[in-house]
Amino acid sequence: MVSAGRPARRRFRHGAAVVGVIAASLLMAAPAHGATPDAGQWWYDAYGVDQVHAEGLTGQGLKIAVIDSQMNPDLPVFEGADLTIAPGAGCRDAEPTTDQLNDHSRHGSTVTALLIGNGTGAGAISGIVPDASVTFYGFGDKGDDCVQTPEAAEAGLSPTGWLFQRAIDDGADIISTSQGGGASNYEDLAVVAEAIARQIPIVAATPNDGITGAIFPSGYSGIVAVNAVDQQQQLFVTEMGVENAILDTTVVAPGGPFPSIGAPEGTWDDSNRTQGASLATPLVAGILALTAQKYPDATMNQLIQSLIHNTGPDDHELSYSPDNGYGYGVASLGHVLRVDPTSYDDVNPLLDKAVQQPTAEQIATAMAAVTGDAPATSEPSEAADAPADADGSGMGTLLVVGAIVVGIIVVGAVILTIILVRRSHRTDREGQS
C-alpha cells in the first residue's frame, strides 16, 4: 500500500541554517546489465530471519520512518507493503519519489526494501520487517544543492532537522536514516533532544570514507550510529586503503556486498553489488523493531541497552571501543531476541559521545516538555533552607552583615587601587630616567 501522509511541523524561535545533505553512500560495483543476480542476501540467512518470521515476529505494529534521498514506491518489491510516502521533499523544488532511476532513487529504494521488501524484482530483496508500517521522508534529488523548504526555514530547521521533526510528529517508533553530513544548528539539536526524550531511536549510518570526525546525525549523542561489516565481520576498506574505523560507532551490522535495486547506467530491472553503512542501518532498525514486537513492555531505551549488551552470538560483559570502528560489537538479532530487555536501565546509554550535542540542558528541557515536569534545578543552599526568625530579624541581621562585608570590600578595593596607581606611576617615571 502506498499512501500520502499529512505533513507536520513545529515552530521554533531561532533562525534558520541550511545543511547540505550527503548520502552515506552505497559503494557500487560494476553493474550486471540484464542479469538476474543470485539472492546475495547472506545477512538474511546469517540472522535466521525466516525462523524469526515463522515465530510471528515480522515488525507488525511498529512504525518506522525512513529518511533518505528519493525512492520509487511503485517497484514490484514494495507490492503489498505498508508503505506511506510523506508528501513534500526535504529540499526545496524537489520530490521524494520518482520513477526515474538515478543514484538517489536507487539508494532510497534499496535501503527501504531491506526493511519491507517482498523478495521480488531486481535484487530480490526480502525485508527484515516485512509487516512493519514504513513512512518514507525524502530529501529529493538535490544532493549538495539541497536548500531548506520555506516550512523548514520558518521552523528554523535544516532539511534534516525538519524531516526528523515531521517523523516525530507523525508518531514514528523508530527513525532510520542512511543520510548524513554537514552541520546542525541549535534547533536541529532540539529536535534530536525531543527524539531522545520521547524514546524514538534515531538509527543513522556512519560515513563510508574513513573520516573519523563526527558528522550529523550519527556522531551525536543519543544516536545509534551504525557501521558496516562484510560476511567475515571485517570492516570495509575505503578508497584510501584504510579500514573504515569511524569514531563513536555504536554497533556494526552486515553491510554487503548485497544486490541493489537498479544499477548505474542501467534500468530498474538491473542490479549490482552494493556495500556500505547505508545497508547496515535499516537492518539495525529492523532488529530494534523485532525486539520491540517480542517485548512490548520494554521501553526503547531498554531496547537500545539490549542492542549494545547483546552483540555477537554469546553472552559477555559490556565492552566498548570508541575508535576501532566496531563500537559495542556486531549487532545480533538472535541474541537480543533471547534476552528480556526490561531488566536494563530505562536510560539512553549513548549520551556520552565525544560530541556533547545535544547538550544535557537541551535533553532535560525536552524531557520536561514531554513529561510535564519542571527541569531539574540546582540544590538549594543551606542559607535558603534556614528558617527565618518569626519577627523577620534573622533576615534583617543577614542584610546588615552583608552590607558591612560589602562596605569593607569596597574600601579595601579603593585603597588597593590607590597603592597600585602610585606604584605604576613610580615605575613609569623610573623607566624614563
Image: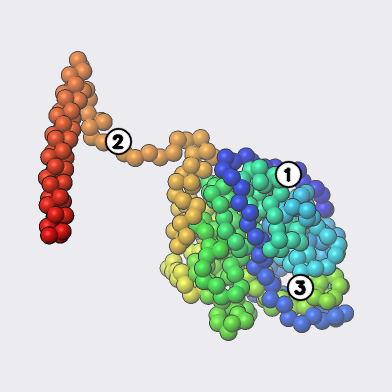
Q: Which is more foreground, mark 3 or mark 2? A: 2
Q: Earlier in the sequence, mark 1 or mark 2?
A: 1
- In the current view of this chain or complex, which residue is farthest to the front? 433
Residue to which mark 3 is pinned? 260
Kind of residue indicated by mark 3:
Ser
Q: Can you see residue 16?
A: yes
Where in the figure is residue 29, as x and y percent of width and height? Answer: 73, 81
**Percent of width and height locating residue 99:** 86, 62
- Closer to the chain start, of discs 3 and 2, is 3
Answer with the quarter of the image where residue 100 lies.
bottom right
| CA distance for labels 3 and 2 | 60 Å
Of all residues, the one furthest to the bottom in this rendering is 241
Q: CA distance from mark 1 to mark 2?
A: 44 Å
- Determine which residue is flagged by label 2: 380
Q: Residue at x 62, y 39 (%)?
A: 11
Indicate which disc, 1 or 3, sits on the residue closer to the N terminus. Answer: 1
Q: Are marks 3 and 2 in contact (CB under 8 Å)?
A: no
Q: Secondary structure at mark 1?
A: loop
Q: Amino acid at mark 2?
A: Pro
The residue wearing badge 1 is: 7
Task: Count neighbours of disc 2 (C-alpha within 10 A) and say few if under 14, some if 14 to 19, many if 20 or more.
Answer: few
In the image, what residue occupies the spot 14% across and 35% down? 411
User: Residue at 76% across / 73% down in the picture?
Assistant: 260
